[in-house]
Structures are given as structure tokens and as C-alpha cells.
Image: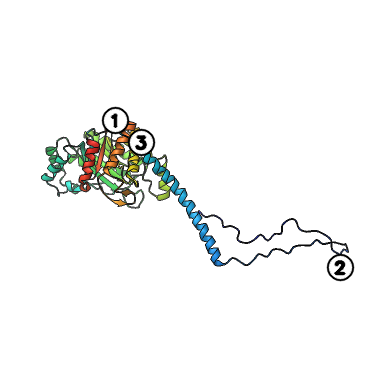
Amino acid sequence: MERPPGRTTADTEPDGEAASGTERGNPDNPESTGELKTPEKQEPPESPGPPESPVKQGRRWRRWVRRGALAVVLLVLVPVLTAEAVLGVNGMGDPAGSARTRGKDALWLGHAWVDGRKTDADVEALARRLADTGIRDLYVHAGPLEHDGTLPASAYPRARWFVAAVHRAAPRLRVQAWLGDVLASETPDGMRLERPATRAAVVRSAREILAAGFEGAHFDLEPLHSDDAHYLALLDSLRAVTRAHHAQLSVAAHQIDPVPGFHSFWGTTTGHPKWWSQKFFGQVAGRVDQIAVMSYDTMQPLQRTYSGYVAQQTSLALEVTPRSTDLLMGLPFYQENRFGHWAHAETVAAAVRGVRLGLSRTDADRANFGVAAYVDFTATETDWRAYRTGWVR
């Protein structure tokens, strides 16, 4: 923010009022009145002095630029530091002892499980991995959907084998098809939910994957802006299909506004709203059997502030999710360092702590609640250990 430069020259106006008096008329001047005026002694006007050198002008300009830059930094930095301090405090405290797994957790699985790269031995190893956990649902990637909403059967050629193999190795597990696509909400290319034909094609794709043996359909469409009525209409149509097949309808959900209306502010300044309003989150949650919050990629720099952020997200989601809907909070089973995600801060241990704090403070007895781990092919032993020790036991 620029500020106007100061005055660069001395004041050339004399102090006080203009001098007055009389002067003797000039007989040689025909315009003279001949009145006698006695002039007062006047000081000569101050000299403006030499002009400021270009070097001094440059220094003055740089000084004002620095001051303006400092003002902008303070305007941005102070609110951010205040918010981070609040999240740090929110990440403190002791969660309730009952804030543990309810046996309704989930795991996102990569495409290799249905395209022929995995074997029976791999399924048996997965079953052993999950035997002492609270994981019930597997979201296995069977897409992506085409931009027109269709899904070729060639995208999931080994689906029937995988579902049958899982049921043999771990009968308690439920296998859902993870279907996603990029929406044309911020770029020209992608799926357009405003087209009825596209939504109808997505519904047909859901019927097809349920006919292939999947026990549910899990949708992850991004970036999905808050208050998208076309998305709500799609969910209504999908719910009718999954209920008819006695199957699950599940979605991956964006995070909720940390302060009311924040998605509008962020969308205006960056072009990517990222968050949903709490009201819209509740409207989505009321239309599905499961809703899994993608509570990672939060831009948090510290484990404590990340825990505080997840605790807040958990509370906000619990407040508007029907008790009949399974609410799952995402855990980052991956390690990346980029804008929006710092691996040293967004750890599984910190996420679990935040989930337990939010659950304890808001609805400690909520039965239909769990966590969802993203994703199997990047998970480390440290991730699994943090999940077991922090959430399972």
C-alpha cells in the first residue's frame, strides 16, 4: 500500500499577513494618486534553495516503498499469526479415553488392485495388515470417469476377482468402487455437472460398477465448489440407485470454512475456493451413507497447529452430519513437501490427535464415526503404527 510522499521544498510563503503602508506619489507617473504612503520594512522572500538531487529523491522514494511494504506485510501477517496461535491452543488438551475407533474406518486403495497387477498373495497380505485395525471399508480406485460421465468396463477388468478375494481373506471388509474425475469448475477441461446428460451417465456408471460386484460407490469429484446444486441433484439420483442395490453411497468431501464465508474470500483472491460452507457440507452429508473429509493439504506449518485445525474440522463436520451418516476424517498416509502440505507437520499422529480432540469436545459418543487413510501405496510403517497406537488402541 503506497503512502503519499512528504513535502520536498521549503515553504515559500512569508509569515504573517502582507505588509501595508503608504508611499509617496510619483509626480512623473500620471496614474499616481499623490497619496503619501510610508512603507514598512519588508524581509526579502526566502529562497527555495537548490533542487533535491536525484540520489536524495531515490532514497526518499525507497524509504516510502519500504514503509508501504511493511504495512502490507503487517496487514497480512498479523491475522495469520493470530489464527495460527488459535489453532495451536486448539490442539492442546487431553482427548477422552472413549475417542477411539468404532470399527468404521476406511482405506483408499490404488488402481493396481483391479487392473491385474495384484495377486491373491497381495490380498492375503492386505488382510493380515488390516486384521488388527478398525478398517471396514476399502475404496479401490476403479476409474477415473470420463468427462462425459461414462466409465468403460476396461477400467476395472479384475474387479470381480478382487471383491471375491477380499471376501475370502477378510469377510468383514466391504469393497467400494472409488470413482473420480476433474471438474470443469476452474479450467475449460473436465466434467460438467451442469449438463443433465453428464449426470445421467454418472448414474449409469454407478449401476454398472454395482453390477460388477462392488458393494458401494465412492465419488471424489474435484475441485467441487461450495453450494453446487447440480452436485446435490446428482447425489439424489445416485442414492436411489445404491439403495435399490442395498449398497453404500460414499463421497470424499472438501474441508469446511474455518471461519464463515472463507471459501468466498479465498475464491475471490486465488480463484480456488477450496473450502465448503458448513451448510453445504451438511446438505451433502444428509444425502449419502458415508462422507470422508479430506482433512489434509491444510497449509499448516506445525504439528500442533495441524492437530488444532483437524480438531476444528472434526467439530464443524460433527455439528452438521446426521447421526445416521458415517463421518470419516482423513489421515495423510503420504509424505510430500509442497505448498499446502508439509510432511513434518501433517503427520498421522498429529491428525489422529486432532480427530480425537474434536470428537471428545463435540460428540464423544457418536457411533457412526471413523477415520479414512489416504492412500495404501504411499503408506509407511510409521503411518500404520501411528494409526494403531493413536486411534485403534
Q: Are marks 1 and 3 in contact (CB under 8 Å)?
A: no
Q: Which residue is mark 2?
A: 26
The disc at residue 366 is 1
Residue found at x 66% / y 59%: 11
Looking at the image, residue 227 sits to the left or right of residue 291; the answer is right
Give whichever of 84, 3 is nearer the camera.
84
Q: Amino acid at mark 2?
A: Asn
Q: CA distance from mark 2 to mark 1?
A: 107 Å
Q: Which residue is mark 3?
A: 316
Q: Position of residue 207 (x, y in %)?
A: 22, 40
Q: Earlier in the sequence, mark 2 or mark 1?
A: 2
Residue found at x 35% / y 33%: 319
Q: CA distance from mark 1 to mark 3?
A: 14 Å
Q: Amino acid at mark 3?
A: Leu
Q: How many marks?
A: 3
Q: Is residue 229 depicted above or below 43 in this figure? A: above
Q: Is residue 378 depicted above or below 31 in this figure? A: above
Give whichever of 129, 162 is nearer the camera.
129
The disc at residue 135 is none
Mark 1, secondary structure of its residue: loop
Foreground tag (2 vs 3) = 2
Q: CA distance from mark 2 to mark 3?
A: 94 Å
Q: Amino acid at mark 1?
A: Arg
Can the viewer see residue 139?
Answer: no
Quadrant position of the C terminus in the picture: top left
**Farthest-out residue, bottom:** 28
